[in-house]
Image (cartoon, coloured by chain):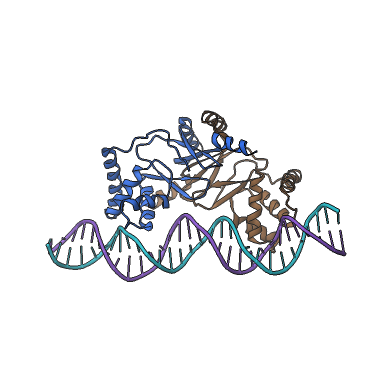
Chain colours: A blue, B brown, C cyan, D purple
Amino acid sequence: MLQRRIDDHAPPSRESMREAQEIFYRHLKRVGLKHTDQRDTILRTFLETRDHLSTDELFRLVRKKDAKIGFTTVYRTLKLLSECGLASAVPFPDGMARYEHQFNRRSHHHMVCTDCGASVEFFSPEVIKLEEEVGRKYHFDATRHNFQIYGVCEDCRKKSRRIS
Amino acid sequence: MLQRRIDDHAPPSRESMREAQEIFYRHLKRVGLKHTDQRDTILRTFLETRDHLSTDELFRLVRKKDAKIGFTTVYRTLKLLSECGLASAVPFPDGMARYEHQFNRRSHHHMVCTDCGASVEFFSPEVIKLEEEVGRKYHFDATRHNFQIYGVCEDCRKKSRRIS
DNA sequence: AATGAAAATGAAATTCATTTTCATTTAGCC
DNA sequence: GGCTAAATGAAAATGAATTTCATTTTCATT
Protein backbone atom coordinates (compact mmCIF):
# COMPACT_ATOMS: atom_id res chain seq x y z
CA MET A 1 0.00 0.00 0.00
CA LEU A 2 1.55 3.23 -1.20
CA GLN A 3 1.84 5.99 1.37
CA ARG A 4 3.71 8.86 -0.09
CA ARG A 5 5.18 11.59 2.02
CA ILE A 6 5.59 14.48 -0.28
CA ASP A 7 8.34 16.47 1.40
CA ASP A 8 11.21 16.12 3.84
CA HIS A 9 12.25 13.05 1.95
CA ALA A 10 15.87 13.12 3.01
CA PRO A 11 16.80 10.52 5.62
CA PRO A 12 17.43 12.12 9.01
CA SER A 13 20.88 13.65 9.42
CA ARG A 14 23.12 12.44 12.20
CA GLU A 15 22.49 15.67 14.11
CA SER A 16 18.72 15.54 13.88
CA MET A 17 18.82 11.89 14.91
CA ARG A 18 20.80 12.85 17.97
CA GLU A 19 18.45 15.71 18.72
CA ALA A 20 15.48 13.34 18.63
CA GLN A 21 17.27 10.86 20.86
CA GLU A 22 17.93 13.62 23.33
CA ILE A 23 14.25 14.52 23.45
CA PHE A 24 13.48 10.87 24.07
CA TYR A 25 16.08 10.40 26.79
CA ARG A 26 15.04 13.56 28.57
CA HIS A 27 11.50 12.24 28.59
CA LEU A 28 12.63 8.88 29.96
CA LYS A 29 14.57 10.56 32.72
CA ARG A 30 11.66 12.81 33.60
CA VAL A 31 9.34 9.85 34.16
CA GLY A 32 12.02 7.73 35.85
CA LEU A 33 12.59 5.22 33.06
CA LYS A 34 15.79 3.74 31.76
CA HIS A 35 17.83 4.01 28.63
CA THR A 36 18.16 0.71 26.82
CA ASP A 37 19.61 -0.55 23.55
CA GLN A 38 16.20 -1.79 22.44
CA ARG A 39 14.61 1.61 22.86
CA ASP A 40 17.52 3.11 20.99
CA THR A 41 17.15 0.75 18.07
CA ILE A 42 13.40 1.23 17.93
CA LEU A 43 13.67 5.02 17.92
CA ARG A 44 16.31 4.99 15.20
CA THR A 45 14.34 2.63 13.04
CA PHE A 46 11.23 4.71 13.48
CA LEU A 47 12.96 7.95 12.52
CA GLU A 48 14.25 6.38 9.34
CA THR A 49 10.75 5.61 8.15
CA ARG A 50 8.73 7.87 5.91
CA ASP A 51 5.39 6.13 6.19
CA HIS A 52 2.47 5.60 8.47
CA LEU A 53 3.33 2.45 10.31
CA SER A 54 1.31 0.06 12.36
CA THR A 55 2.99 -1.37 15.45
CA ASP A 56 3.48 -4.61 13.61
CA GLU A 57 5.07 -2.96 10.60
CA LEU A 58 7.55 -1.16 12.80
CA PHE A 59 8.20 -4.40 14.65
CA ARG A 60 9.14 -6.09 11.37
CA LEU A 61 11.58 -3.31 10.52
CA VAL A 62 13.09 -3.40 13.98
CA ARG A 63 13.48 -7.15 13.79
CA LYS A 64 15.75 -6.79 10.77
CA LYS A 65 18.19 -4.81 12.89
CA ASP A 66 17.91 -6.89 16.02
CA ALA A 67 15.95 -10.10 15.84
CA LYS A 68 15.81 -10.42 19.61
CA ILE A 69 13.58 -7.37 20.12
CA GLY A 70 10.00 -8.43 20.76
CA PHE A 71 6.71 -7.03 19.60
CA THR A 72 5.77 -5.97 23.11
CA THR A 73 8.80 -3.74 23.44
CA VAL A 74 8.07 -2.05 20.14
CA TYR A 75 4.48 -1.55 21.24
CA ARG A 76 5.54 -0.02 24.52
CA THR A 77 8.23 2.16 22.99
CA LEU A 78 5.80 3.54 20.45
CA LYS A 79 3.63 4.63 23.35
CA LEU A 80 6.56 6.35 24.99
CA LEU A 81 7.40 8.11 21.74
CA SER A 82 3.83 9.34 21.51
CA GLU A 83 3.99 10.64 25.06
CA CYS A 84 6.97 12.83 24.31
CA GLY A 85 5.61 14.03 21.00
CA LEU A 86 8.05 12.27 18.70
CA ALA A 87 5.33 10.04 17.30
CA SER A 88 1.67 10.58 16.73
CA ALA A 89 -1.20 8.35 15.82
CA VAL A 90 -2.95 8.91 12.52
CA PRO A 91 -6.45 7.45 12.23
CA PHE A 92 -6.66 5.51 8.97
CA PRO A 93 -9.84 3.98 7.63
CA ASP A 94 -8.66 0.40 8.19
CA GLY A 95 -9.07 1.02 11.91
CA MET A 96 -5.59 -0.08 12.84
CA ALA A 97 -3.45 2.31 14.88
CA ARG A 98 -0.82 3.88 12.67
CA TYR A 99 1.96 6.17 13.73
CA GLU A 100 4.17 8.68 12.00
CA HIS A 101 7.13 10.44 13.44
CA GLN A 102 6.86 14.14 14.05
CA PHE A 103 10.46 15.03 14.17
CA ASN A 104 11.46 17.96 11.98
CA ARG A 105 8.34 17.74 9.90
CA ARG A 106 6.09 20.53 8.74
CA SER A 107 2.54 20.31 9.95
CA HIS A 108 0.68 18.40 7.28
CA HIS A 109 -2.47 16.47 6.60
CA HIS A 110 -3.45 13.38 4.69
CA MET A 111 -5.56 12.63 1.69
CA VAL A 112 -6.42 8.96 1.69
CA CYS A 113 -7.77 6.78 -1.11
CA THR A 114 -10.74 4.79 0.15
CA ASP A 115 -10.11 2.17 -2.54
CA CYS A 116 -6.46 1.25 -2.23
CA GLY A 117 -5.54 3.05 0.99
CA ALA A 118 -2.77 5.08 -0.61
CA SER A 119 -2.17 8.37 1.11
CA VAL A 120 -0.68 11.65 0.03
CA GLU A 121 0.26 14.50 2.28
CA PHE A 122 -0.81 18.05 1.79
CA PHE A 123 -0.15 21.30 3.58
CA SER A 124 -2.70 23.79 4.68
CA PRO A 125 -1.79 26.72 6.88
CA GLU A 126 -5.49 27.68 7.04
CA VAL A 127 -6.21 24.65 9.16
CA ILE A 128 -3.67 25.72 11.74
CA LYS A 129 -5.29 29.13 12.00
CA LEU A 130 -8.66 27.41 12.31
CA GLU A 131 -7.43 25.33 15.24
CA GLU A 132 -6.58 28.50 17.15
CA GLU A 133 -9.78 30.31 16.29
CA VAL A 134 -12.12 27.48 17.17
CA GLY A 135 -10.26 26.77 20.37
CA ARG A 136 -10.62 30.38 21.44
CA LYS A 137 -14.29 30.44 20.56
CA TYR A 138 -15.23 27.41 22.65
CA HIS A 139 -12.72 28.04 25.45
CA PHE A 140 -10.65 24.98 24.70
CA ASP A 141 -6.91 24.92 25.08
CA ALA A 142 -6.38 23.45 21.61
CA THR A 143 -3.26 21.32 21.35
CA ARG A 144 -3.57 19.42 18.08
CA HIS A 145 -5.93 18.44 15.36
CA ASN A 146 -6.46 15.80 12.83
CA PHE A 147 -7.64 16.33 9.32
CA GLN A 148 -8.00 13.81 6.56
CA ILE A 149 -9.69 14.00 3.22
CA TYR A 150 -11.02 10.78 1.75
CA GLY A 151 -11.63 10.08 -1.89
CA VAL A 152 -10.60 7.92 -4.81
CA CYS A 153 -7.19 8.39 -6.36
CA GLU A 154 -6.52 8.68 -10.08
CA ASP A 155 -5.14 5.15 -10.40
CA CYS A 156 -8.19 3.58 -8.78
CA ARG A 157 -10.54 5.62 -10.93
CA LYS A 158 -8.73 4.33 -14.02
CA LYS A 159 -8.90 0.75 -12.78
CA SER A 160 -12.61 0.87 -12.03
CA ARG A 161 -13.28 2.38 -15.46
CA ARG A 162 -11.49 -0.56 -17.05
CA ILE A 163 -13.66 -3.05 -15.17
CA SER A 164 -17.02 -1.44 -15.89
CA MET B 1 -19.32 11.74 29.00
CA LEU B 2 -20.79 14.96 27.73
CA GLN B 3 -21.17 15.24 23.99
CA ARG B 4 -22.92 18.39 23.09
CA ARG B 5 -24.39 18.94 19.71
CA ILE B 6 -24.66 22.62 19.36
CA ASP B 7 -27.43 22.90 16.83
CA ASP B 8 -30.35 20.97 15.40
CA HIS B 9 -31.37 20.10 18.92
CA ALA B 10 -35.00 19.42 18.17
CA PRO B 11 -35.98 15.75 18.05
CA PRO B 12 -36.70 14.63 14.50
CA SER B 13 -40.18 15.54 13.24
CA ARG B 14 -42.50 12.81 12.02
CA GLU B 15 -41.90 13.91 8.43
CA SER B 16 -38.13 13.90 8.63
CA MET B 17 -38.25 10.52 10.32
CA ARG B 18 -40.32 9.21 7.44
CA GLU B 19 -37.97 10.78 4.94
CA ALA B 20 -35.00 9.04 6.50
CA GLN B 21 -36.85 5.73 6.55
CA GLU B 22 -37.55 6.13 2.87
CA ILE B 23 -33.88 6.66 2.12
CA PHE B 24 -33.12 3.52 4.08
CA TYR B 25 -35.79 1.40 2.43
CA ARG B 26 -34.79 2.55 -1.02
CA HIS B 27 -31.25 1.48 -0.21
CA LEU B 28 -32.42 -1.90 1.06
CA LYS B 29 -34.43 -2.49 -2.09
CA ARG B 30 -31.51 -1.45 -4.28
CA VAL B 31 -29.20 -4.05 -2.77
CA GLY B 32 -31.92 -6.72 -2.53
CA LEU B 33 -32.45 -6.72 1.20
CA LYS B 34 -35.61 -6.91 3.22
CA HIS B 35 -37.58 -4.55 5.37
CA THR B 36 -37.91 -5.77 8.93
CA ASP B 37 -39.31 -4.50 12.19
CA GLN B 38 -35.90 -4.74 13.81
CA ARG B 39 -34.27 -2.51 11.22
CA ASP B 40 -37.12 -0.08 11.63
CA THR B 41 -36.72 0.10 15.38
CA ILE B 42 -32.97 0.50 15.12
CA LEU B 43 -33.20 3.31 12.58
CA ARG B 44 -35.78 5.16 14.64
CA THR B 45 -33.77 4.82 17.81
CA PHE B 46 -30.67 6.02 16.06
CA LEU B 47 -32.36 9.09 14.60
CA GLU B 48 -33.58 10.10 18.03
CA THR B 49 -30.06 10.27 19.38
CA ARG B 50 -27.95 13.40 19.49
CA ASP B 51 -24.63 11.87 20.37
CA HIS B 52 -21.76 9.88 19.01
CA LEU B 53 -22.70 6.34 19.80
CA SER B 54 -20.74 3.14 19.89
CA THR B 55 -22.51 0.05 18.59
CA ASP B 56 -22.97 -1.12 22.13
CA GLU B 57 -24.48 2.15 23.27
CA LEU B 58 -27.01 2.07 20.45
CA PHE B 59 -27.73 -1.56 21.25
CA ARG B 60 -28.60 -0.61 24.84
CA LEU B 61 -31.00 2.08 23.64
CA VAL B 62 -32.61 -0.28 21.15
CA ARG B 63 -33.01 -2.95 23.79
CA LYS B 64 -35.21 -0.61 25.82
CA LYS B 65 -37.68 -0.52 22.95
CA ASP B 66 -37.48 -4.17 22.01
CA ALA B 67 -35.56 -6.48 24.29
CA LYS B 68 -35.53 -9.23 21.68
CA ILE B 69 -33.27 -7.37 19.26
CA GLY B 70 -29.70 -8.66 19.44
CA PHE B 71 -26.40 -6.89 19.35
CA THR B 72 -25.51 -8.46 16.01
CA THR B 73 -28.51 -6.96 14.29
CA VAL B 74 -27.72 -3.50 15.61
CA TYR B 75 -24.16 -3.93 14.43
CA ARG B 76 -25.26 -4.99 10.96
CA THR B 77 -27.90 -2.30 10.66
CA LEU B 78 -25.40 0.38 11.61
CA LYS B 79 -23.27 -0.80 8.71
CA LEU B 80 -26.23 -0.56 6.36
CA LEU B 81 -26.98 2.94 7.59
CA SER B 82 -23.40 3.92 6.91
CA GLU B 83 -23.64 2.53 3.40
CA CYS B 84 -26.59 4.70 2.53
CA GLY B 85 -25.15 7.78 4.16
CA LEU B 86 -27.55 8.05 7.08
CA ALA B 87 -24.81 7.30 9.58
CA SER B 88 -21.13 8.01 9.58
CA ALA B 89 -18.26 6.90 11.70
CA VAL B 90 -16.44 9.52 13.75
CA PRO B 91 -12.95 8.59 14.92
CA PHE B 92 -12.66 9.34 18.63
CA PRO B 93 -9.47 9.08 20.61
CA ASP B 94 -10.70 6.11 22.64
CA GLY B 95 -10.35 4.01 19.50
CA MET B 96 -13.86 2.63 19.60
CA ALA B 97 -16.03 2.97 16.50
CA ARG B 98 -18.58 5.70 17.05
CA TYR B 99 -21.38 6.77 14.77
CA GLU B 100 -23.52 9.81 14.39
CA HIS B 101 -26.52 10.22 12.16
CA GLN B 102 -26.25 12.54 9.23
CA PHE B 103 -29.86 13.16 8.61
CA ASN B 104 -30.81 16.81 8.23
CA ARG B 105 -27.61 17.95 9.78
CA ARG B 106 -25.29 20.68 8.67
CA SER B 107 -21.77 19.60 7.85
CA HIS B 108 -19.85 20.02 11.08
CA HIS B 109 -16.70 19.03 12.89
CA HIS B 110 -15.73 18.12 16.40
CA MET B 111 -13.60 19.61 19.09
CA VAL B 112 -12.77 16.93 21.62
CA CYS B 113 -11.40 17.24 25.13
CA THR B 114 -8.48 14.88 25.58
CA ASP B 115 -9.07 14.84 29.32
CA CYS B 116 -12.75 14.01 29.75
CA GLY B 117 -13.70 13.12 26.17
CA ALA B 118 -16.42 15.77 25.97
CA SER B 119 -17.03 16.96 22.44
CA VAL B 120 -18.47 20.11 20.98
CA GLU B 121 -19.41 20.62 17.39
CA PHE B 122 -18.31 23.52 15.28
CA PHE B 123 -18.95 24.63 11.74
CA SER B 124 -16.41 25.67 9.22
CA PRO B 125 -17.31 26.28 5.59
CA GLU B 126 -13.60 26.84 4.84
CA VAL B 127 -12.91 23.17 5.40
CA ILE B 128 -15.44 22.19 2.77
CA LYS B 129 -13.80 24.47 0.24
CA LEU B 130 -10.44 23.00 1.19
CA GLU B 131 -11.68 19.49 0.47
CA GLU B 132 -12.51 20.48 -3.09
CA GLU B 133 -9.28 22.36 -3.69
CA VAL B 134 -6.96 19.70 -2.36
CA GLY B 135 -8.84 16.99 -4.23
CA ARG B 136 -8.42 18.89 -7.47
CA LYS B 137 -4.75 19.51 -6.86
CA TYR B 138 -3.86 15.86 -6.26
CA HIS B 139 -6.35 14.41 -8.75
CA PHE B 140 -8.43 12.71 -6.12
CA ASP B 141 -12.16 12.42 -6.37
CA ALA B 142 -12.72 13.75 -2.85
CA THR B 143 -15.87 12.41 -1.23
CA ARG B 144 -15.60 13.26 2.44
CA HIS B 145 -13.25 14.41 5.13
CA ASN B 146 -12.77 14.24 8.80
CA PHE B 147 -11.57 17.02 11.00
CA GLN B 148 -11.20 17.08 14.73
CA ILE B 149 -9.47 19.48 17.02
CA TYR B 150 -8.16 18.16 20.30
CA GLY B 151 -7.52 20.14 23.42
CA VAL B 152 -8.51 20.58 27.03
CA CYS B 153 -11.90 22.03 27.85
CA GLU B 154 -12.53 24.79 30.35
CA ASP B 155 -13.93 22.45 33.01
CA CYS B 156 -10.91 20.18 32.91
CA ARG B 157 -8.52 23.10 33.07
CA LYS B 158 -10.31 24.30 36.21
CA LYS B 159 -10.19 20.84 37.74
CA SER B 160 -6.47 20.36 37.11
CA ARG B 161 -5.76 23.78 38.58
CA ARG B 162 -7.55 22.72 41.75
CA ILE B 163 -5.38 19.62 42.06
CA SER B 164 -2.02 21.26 41.47
C1' DA C 1 34.32 -3.69 39.69
C1' DA C 2 30.40 -5.54 42.75
C1' DT C 3 25.78 -4.91 44.64
C1' DG C 4 20.96 -4.48 44.72
C1' DA C 5 16.65 -2.22 43.82
C1' DA C 6 13.84 -0.76 40.25
C1' DA C 7 12.78 -1.14 35.69
C1' DA C 8 12.84 -3.57 31.05
C1' DT C 9 12.16 -7.35 28.32
C1' DG C 10 9.62 -10.67 25.63
C1' DA C 11 6.84 -14.83 25.32
C1' DA C 12 2.59 -16.09 26.42
C1' DA C 13 -1.87 -15.23 28.10
C1' DT C 14 -5.73 -12.14 28.35
C1' DT C 15 -8.96 -8.77 27.07
C1' DC C 16 -12.38 -6.93 24.41
C1' DA C 17 -14.46 -4.79 20.32
C1' DT C 18 -15.56 -6.49 16.07
C1' DT C 19 -16.89 -9.92 12.80
C1' DT C 20 -18.38 -14.47 11.27
C1' DT C 21 -20.91 -18.80 11.62
C1' DC C 22 -24.86 -21.38 11.68
C1' DA C 23 -29.30 -23.15 12.96
C1' DT C 24 -33.72 -21.21 13.02
C1' DT C 25 -37.19 -17.82 11.78
C1' DT C 26 -39.23 -14.39 8.74
C1' DA C 27 -40.32 -11.43 4.59
C1' DG C 28 -42.32 -11.00 0.50
C1' DC C 29 -42.69 -12.56 -4.36
C1' DC C 30 -45.17 -16.28 -6.96
C1' DG D 1 -50.50 -20.76 1.29
C1' DG D 2 -45.83 -22.14 -0.47
C1' DC D 3 -41.24 -21.22 -1.50
C1' DT D 4 -36.72 -19.14 -1.52
C1' DA D 5 -33.62 -15.93 -0.22
C1' DA D 6 -32.60 -13.12 3.43
C1' DA D 7 -32.70 -11.89 8.54
C1' DT D 8 -32.00 -12.95 13.06
C1' DG D 9 -29.42 -13.66 17.25
C1' DA D 10 -26.71 -16.65 20.19
C1' DA D 11 -22.44 -18.32 20.28
C1' DA D 12 -17.99 -18.82 18.51
C1' DA D 13 -14.02 -16.82 16.13
C1' DT D 14 -10.98 -13.27 15.12
C1' DG D 15 -7.37 -10.18 15.82
C1' DA D 16 -5.34 -5.96 17.53
C1' DA D 17 -4.19 -4.09 21.87
C1' DT D 18 -2.80 -4.82 26.46
C1' DT D 19 -1.29 -7.21 30.62
C1' DT D 20 1.18 -10.75 33.18
C1' DC D 21 5.14 -12.72 34.94
C1' DA D 22 9.56 -14.93 35.17
C1' DT D 23 13.92 -13.51 33.78
C1' DT D 24 17.34 -10.12 32.50
C1' DT D 25 19.27 -5.54 32.45
C1' DT D 26 20.20 -0.80 33.89
C1' DC D 27 22.30 2.33 36.87
C1' DA D 28 23.02 4.66 41.26
C1' DT D 29 25.58 3.44 45.12
C1' DT D 30 29.19 1.25 47.28
Determine whether, in the image, residue A15 is placed left or right of residue A103: left
Q: Which residue is painted at 71% across and 51% down in the image?
A: B44
Determine whether, in the image, residue C29 is placed left or right of residue A12: right
**Residue A95 x, y percent position in the rendering:** 51, 50
| Relative vertical location of residue C23 with respect to residue B149 in this rendering, above or below | below
| Relative vertical location of residue B72 with respect to residue B101 in this rendering, above or below | below
Tell me if residue B92 can be seen. yes
Tell me if residue A30 can be seen. no
Determine whether, in the image, residue A41 is placed left or right of residue B141: left
Q: Which residue is painted at 65% across and 41% down in the image?
A: B8
Image quadrant occupied by the C terminus of chain A: top right
Residue B46 or B86: which is nearer the viewer?
B86
Q: Which residue is painted at 68% across and 48% down in the image?
A: B47
| Relative vertical location of residue B73 with respect to residue A10 in this rendering, above or below | below
- What is the number of callouts on the image? 0
Q: Residue furthest front?
A: A162
Res A153 quadrant in image: top right
Res B68 quadrant in image: bottom right
**Residue A110 x, y percent position in the rendering:** 48, 38
Residue C10 or B23: which is nearer the viewer?
C10
**Residue B123 x, y percent position in the rendering:** 57, 36
**Residue A61 x, y percent position in the rendering:** 37, 49
